[in-house]
Image (cartoon, grey):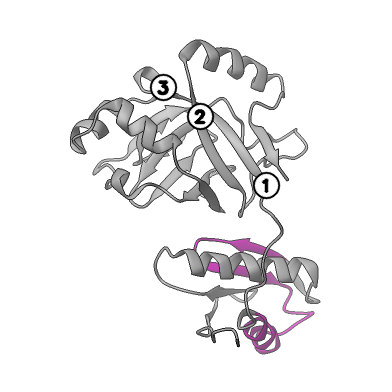
Amino acid sequence: MAAPSLAPPRLLPSGDAAITVEFGRIIDELANHRVLALDRALAEDPIEGVTETVPTYRSLLVHYDPVRIGFEELAERLSALARLPVASAAPARRWRIPVAYGGEHGIDLEDVATALNMTPDDIVTRHVGRDYRVAMIGFTPGWSYLSGLDSSLQMPRLQSPRLLTPSGTISIGGLQAGIQCLAGPSGWRLLGRTAVRTYQLHRDPVFLLEPGDAITFYAIDGKQFAEQDRAAARGEWVAQLVTS
């Protein structure tokens, strides 16, 4: 049976040295798979003049050197690649990430439980019971946007974002779950905290997680978090790589 035809992406100039290849306008699993497939294709068979690619949920930003390749030629080649059937990716790396839920580590857990007419334990059970996928990395270094959130846990973001939230925060916002690496502002609901450093400048690799990686969470207590946080600060891996 022939593979179903795919809608052509929109190709949008982004300044004079980048093209946005847009596969959709909403968060969508198929669109994200197409983004990552095109990103893989460009990594495996580079186009002369392309200098960097940046995958997001629904689009791929392709930076290029306009002296080495022009917009029209690059757009034509990207369009052709983007309309090919989405090839199966290699088996995803799977990570198990520890989380200390609630209390000082997850200051919104009680409010989320109340709003959803559940107990905090219900929220934790549903949160750890899902398989997530890293859809994109962005906002700040190592900030991992995850698809796969249980629909019963979907909540709008805070009306007034906090100006500072802790590093390692595990949070939810709308349809998404997230892992925040560095301390910074956030309007997401904070359920817990992990000692895992998804970004460390002087570590190899600098970024622990990559788009397409599979993620599961498991609960730990505050004492375990403190021990793991000290270990992670020394550069030790706290996340468990289950498959690669």
| Residue depicted at 78% across the width and 37% down the height | 204
Q: Tell me where residue 63 appears, x and y as whole percent.
A: 67, 69
Q: Nearer the viewer, mark 2 or mark 3?
A: 2
| Of residues 40 and 53, the one drawn nearer to the viewer in this rendering | 40
Q: Tell me where residue 127 appears, x and y as whole percent.
A: 40, 37
Q: Is residue 78 magenta?
A: yes
Which residues fall within the magenta stretch?
52-81
The circle drawn on residue 218 is 2
Q: Is residue 121 magenta?
A: no
| Residue depicted at 50% across the width and 69% down the height | 31
| Of residues 198 and 34, the one drawn nearer to the viewer in this rendering | 34
The circle drawn on residue 105 is 3
Identity, as a three-letter code, of the amino acid under mark 3: His
SS state under label 3: helix
Q: CA distance from mark 1 to mark 2?
A: 17 Å
Binning the other alpha carbons within 10 Å of mark 3 as few (below 14), some (14 to 19) or many (20 upward) gives many
- Residue that label 1 marks: 93
| Residue depicted at 37% across the width and 26% down the height | 106
Drawn side of residue 83 relative to residue 29, left or right: right
Q: Tell me where residue 33 appears, x and y as whole percent.
A: 56, 66
| Of residues 144 and 4, the one drawn nearer to the viewer in this rendering | 4
| Residue depicted at 66% across the width and 52% down the height | 92
Q: CA distance from mark 2 to mark 3?
A: 14 Å
Q: Earlier in the sequence, mark 1 or mark 3?
A: 1
Drawn side of residue 221 relative to residue 54, left or right: left
